Image (cartoon, rainbow, N blue to C red):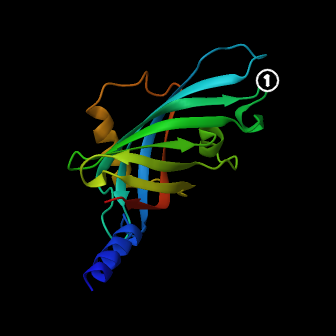
């Protein structure tokens, strides 16, 4: 009987899930983006550095990432072109993201896609993954996608402006920059 009990405990330990069930989430984020083209040679692939700061508000059933802020930085590379932005071929972009919630806990991850064509409404798709975290997010894994909002969320834009005023500027306002609000939906789980 003792051996049967030990075998049952061992099987349970091996097959017991190590994480919690996946949680769906939905947030709205507003961000300020500043970009720099790294060269002006039209015969080379276009390489652009993007930096973005923003604020997040939860719209889901629970308060995942409510009142969080984030920082994104990365590169976008697209084929050479003499055309305008909307005529550019789809580029390949990868951007690191650091999210800090109201308690100071962090989530690390990345976003992928052509951020220029997405913000210009040219059909590009942006998505991302959570890869690491601290505090209550330690062991987080997840995926998310962006969808454009038809209009900016005024209260969130005000919070964004306040957040930006507390930080050193990326560069001169109004030159190579834009801001936008997006709906972000996805799911995540945290390994125990």
Q: Position of residue 175 (x, y in %)?
A: 51, 24
Return the residue nearer the eye: 28 or 44: 44
Q: Quadrant of residue 44?
A: top right
Q: Position of residue 98 (x, y in %)?
A: 38, 40
- The crowding category of the residue bearing disc 1, from other C-alpha atoms within 10 Å (few below 14, some 14 to 19, many at least 20), is few
Identify which residue is drawn at 43% across, 47% down.
131
Task: Judge whether residue 147 can be spotted in this image.
Answer: yes
Question: Quarter of the image containing the N terminus?
Answer: bottom left
Q: Among all residues in the image, which is located at the extreme left?
A: 103
Q: Under tag 1, what secondary structure? A: loop
On screen, residue 158 above or below 47:
below
Identify which residue is drawn at 64% across, 40% down.
114
Q: Quadrant of residue 80?
A: top right
Return the residue nearer the eye: 174 or 159: 159
On screen, residue 69 above or below 7:
above
On screen, residue 2 above or below 14:
below
Q: Which residue is mark 1?
A: 82
Identify which residue is drawn at 38% across, 46% down.
132
Horizontal side, residue 187 vs residue 88: left or right: left
Return the residue nearer the eye: 172 or 51: 51
Q: Among all residues in the image, which is located at the extreme bottom?
A: 1
Task: Judge whether residue 61 can be spotted in this image.
Answer: no
Q: Position of residue 22 (x, y in %)?
A: 43, 67
Identify which residue is drawn at 42% across, 57% down.
28
On screen, residue 170 above or below 188:
above
């Amino acid at each position: 009987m003792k051996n049967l009990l030990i075998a049952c405990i061992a099987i349970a330990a091996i097959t017991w899930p190590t994480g919690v069930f996946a949680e769906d989430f939905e947030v709205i984020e507003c961000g300020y983006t500043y970009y720099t083209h790294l060269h002006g040679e039209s015969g080379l692939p276009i390489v652009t550095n993007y930096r973005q700061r923003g604020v997040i508000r939860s719209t889901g059933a629970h308060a995942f990432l409510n009142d969080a802020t984030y920082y994104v930085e990365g590169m976008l590379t697209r084929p050479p072109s003499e055309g305008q932005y909307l005529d550019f071929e789809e580029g390949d972009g990868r951007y690191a993201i650091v999210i800090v919630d109201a308690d100071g806990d962090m989530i690390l991850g990345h976003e992928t896609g052509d951020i220029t064509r997405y913000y210009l409404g040219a059909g590009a798709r942006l998505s991302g993954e959570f890869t690491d975290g601290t505090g209550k997010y330690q062991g987080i894994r997840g995926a998310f996608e962006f969808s454009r909002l038809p209009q900016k969320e005024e209260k969130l834009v005000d919070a964004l402006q306040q957040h930006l005023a507390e930080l050193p500027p990326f560069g001169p306002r109004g030159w190579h920059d834009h801001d936008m609000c997006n709906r972000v939906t996805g799911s995540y789980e945290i390994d125990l």
